[in-house]
Image (cartoon, rainbow, N blue to C red):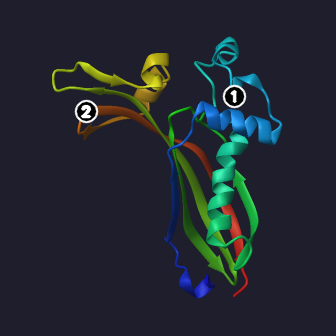
Amino acid sequence: MVKVSDLKVGQVLKNEFEGISREILKQYAKASGDTNPIHTNDVIAERAGLKGVIAHGLLSFGFISKLFEDFLEHGKFGKIIDIAVQMRGMVRCGDILITETIVNKIVGKRVNFEVKQTTITSVDIKDKEGNIVKQFEAGERGYITEKDIQRGLIKTKEVPEGILTYRERIATPGSAIIELFE
């Protein structure tokens, strides 16, 4: 059971999804009726000025609402009052989508959250000599821009195969309010 007394300012709810794929985008396009080919066809996406297909904005948004629905056990313990986000960054195939919310205020039975959805986009893995051991779609298609580098979004970390280069970027910031029944 989720009660107001169980929550504290600063508490985090988090979910990670590693399955953004072309198949998921095709399934979502069919289910949602949003068949814009920039979500399913690389050639069309490139003609539109993109470097490859991008996920539907509402698909990403769905992970935010799912986080709250799961937390509230689909209406058993409360309801979503508001979710307000800004879709700022594209989500691409192969991205890890991290949805994180932080309790920032509790008033009565209403709980306010800061929402942050981040994408982790793997670029490549290099050995100690700097040779590419593995290249991901982001590296092949040139998803990383000079602007990403200037903003300090490009990071590296050691992995078993070598040094992974990746972009970590907030794609969807925002806020949310839920109301608990107890």
Mark closer to the chain start, 2 or 1 = 1
Check disc 2 and report the residue beneath it.
163
Q: Kindly identify the residue that appears in the image at 45 percent across and 17 percent down.
A: 140
Q: Report which quarter residue 29 is drawn in.
A: top right
**Gap in angstroms between the C-alphas marked 2 and 1:** 30 Å
Residue 55 visible to an observer of this rendering: no
Q: Report which quarter residue 40 is drawn in.
A: top right
Q: Is residue 99 left or right of residue 80?
A: left
Depth check: give the residue in front, 180 or 113: 180
Q: Are marks 2 and 1 in contact (CB under 8 Å)?
A: no
Label 1 crowd bin: few (<14), some (14–19), many (20+), radius 10 Å: many
Residue type at numbered disc 1: His
Which quarter of the rendering shows the C terminus?
bottom right
> Where 154 sits versus 66, above or below?
above
> Where 178 sits versus 26, above or below?
below
Count of numbered badges drawn on the protein: 2
Depth check: give the residue in front, 76 or 46: 76
| Residue 4 position in % (x across, y down) | 62, 84
Residue type at numbered disc 2: Ile
| Residue 168 position in % (x across, y down) | 44, 39
| Residue 88 position in % (x across, y down) | 63, 38
| Secondary element type, mark 1 | helix
Check disc 1 and report the residue beneath it.
39
Label 2 crowd bin: few (<14), some (14–19), many (20+), radius 10 Å: some
